[in-house]
């Protein structure tokens, strides 16, 4: 049975690489209450597009798994949920995300009387204890070397330096940088600020330090961005050195970071989030209070900020180097 379940999951995984907006077959077959619960949950309750995409993908995969086993929506049992999780060829953290999606989805079905009980409610997920995040750190010296390596004789170089400078000196997420409009860089009278719109609708304003101010101003002047409603950072037209009117996406920014890192032989696994790790570790290493760093990066819980602290690795490295074998 276990081998059959793994085969089903592998087959379903190939079919479900991309989430679909179409209502799943099992939900359609369960009647209008189930379909209403699906629409309400996916499009009404899941307002964050990333969460919606991930949850929808998890639910679609599980329902396709159940369909292969000839289950109806009303006949799904905790055993089906447990076997599905046991057969997933993914990390424990991914399994927990899938289980969370299923619990919330079946809660919506129960509330709309499409099913009697939530089969995922009693299923225990894997225990995941995270003491340090997995995002790689770029380091202070490589980050400084990266900034200094950018040729700023073109508007594209000025753009890339401004983006990387913002990632370093504000520690914001790459999605917040991609959403910046020209109006989000403004003079408050005694200080220039950047206004960021982050996940879960949070809006934050972070002052520009002196060198970051120069980076952004030089780029904005060279790019000729005057319309306050226009995106601050735009894509380039191939290798022409000219910019379009289209806003950069998070993927565009991630690719430019990897491209710039590759040119100076910084490891390719570095991502835009690596600058967030570096900034947090650097500030905590200088003795900046945890609550101040937490305020800068916008974490609701200080334990989340601690996950970005890479000083433990330095201590461990110092210890192992002293082994005299």
Image (cartoon, rainbow, N blue to C red):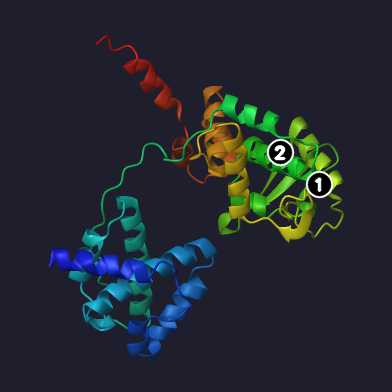
When the figure is inspected, residue 275 is found, relative to residue 3, above or below; the finding is above
SS class, disc 2:
helix
Quarter occupied by residue 167: top right
Horizontal side, residue 106 vs residue 289: left or right: left
Q: Nearer the viewer, mark 1 or mark 2?
A: 2
Horizontal side, residue 194 vs residue 225: left or right: left
- The residue labelled by disc 2 is 161
Q: Can residue 48 be seen in this view?
A: no
Residue lying farthest to the front in this orientation: 239
Picture residue at 78% right of the left edge, 53% below the top: 243
Picture residue at 82% right of the left edge, 43% below the top: 188
When the figure is inspected, residue 96 is found, relative to residue 120, above or below; the finding is above
Q: Where is residue 224 in the image (x, y as percent from the top left)?
A: 87, 50
Q: Position of residue 29 (x, y in %)?
A: 33, 89
Q: How many labels does the image show?
A: 2
Quarter occupied by residue 100: bottom left
- The residue labelled by disc 1 is 186
Distance between the alpha carbons at the discs numbered 1 and 2? 19 Å
When the figure is inspected, residue 53 is found, relative to residue 208, above or below; the finding is below
Picture residue at 46% right of the left edge, 75% below the top: 20
Q: Where is residue 320 in the image (x, y as percent from the top left)?
A: 32, 18
């Amino acid at each position: 049975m276990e081998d059959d379940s793994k085969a089903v999951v592998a087959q379903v995984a190939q079919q479900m690489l991309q989430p679909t907006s179409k209502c799943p077959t099992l939900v359609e077959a369960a009647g209008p209450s189930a379909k209403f619960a699906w629409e309400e949950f996916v499009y009404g309750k899941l307002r964050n597009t990333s969460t919606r995409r991930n949850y929808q993908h998890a639910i679609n995969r599980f329902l396709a798994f159940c369909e292969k086993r000839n289950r109806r929506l009303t006949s799904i049992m905790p055993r089906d949920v447990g076997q599905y999780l046991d057969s997933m060829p993914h990390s424990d953290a991914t399994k927990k995300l899938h289980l969370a999606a299923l619990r919330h989805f079946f809660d919506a079905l129960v509330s709309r009387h499409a099913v009697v009980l939530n089969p995922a409610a009693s299923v225990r997920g894997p225990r995941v204890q995270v003491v340090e995040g997995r995002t790689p750190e770029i380091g202070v010296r490589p980050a400084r070397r990266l900034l200094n390596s950018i040729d700023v004789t073109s508007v594209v170089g000025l753009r890339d330096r401004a983006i990387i400078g913002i990632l370093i000196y504000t520690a914001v997420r790459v999605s917040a940088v991609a959403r910046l409009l020209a109006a989000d860089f403004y003079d408050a009278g005694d200080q220039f600020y950047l206004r960021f719109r982050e996940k879960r609708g949070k809006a934050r304003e972070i002052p520009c330090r002196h060198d970051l101010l120069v980076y952004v101003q030089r780029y904005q002047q060279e790019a000729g961005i005057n319309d306050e409603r226009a995106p601050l950072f735009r894509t380039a037209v191939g290798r022409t050195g000219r910019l379009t009117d289209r806003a950069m996406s998070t993927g565009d920014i991630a690719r430019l970071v990897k491209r710039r890192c590759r040119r100076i032989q910084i490891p390719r696994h570095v991502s835009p989030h690596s600058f967030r790790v570096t900034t947090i570790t650097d500030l905590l290493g200088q003795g900046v209070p945890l609550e101040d760093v937490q305020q800068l990066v916008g974490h609701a819980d200080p334990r989340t900020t601690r996950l970005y602290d890479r000083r433990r690795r330095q201590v461990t490295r110092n210890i192992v180097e002293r082994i005299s074998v």
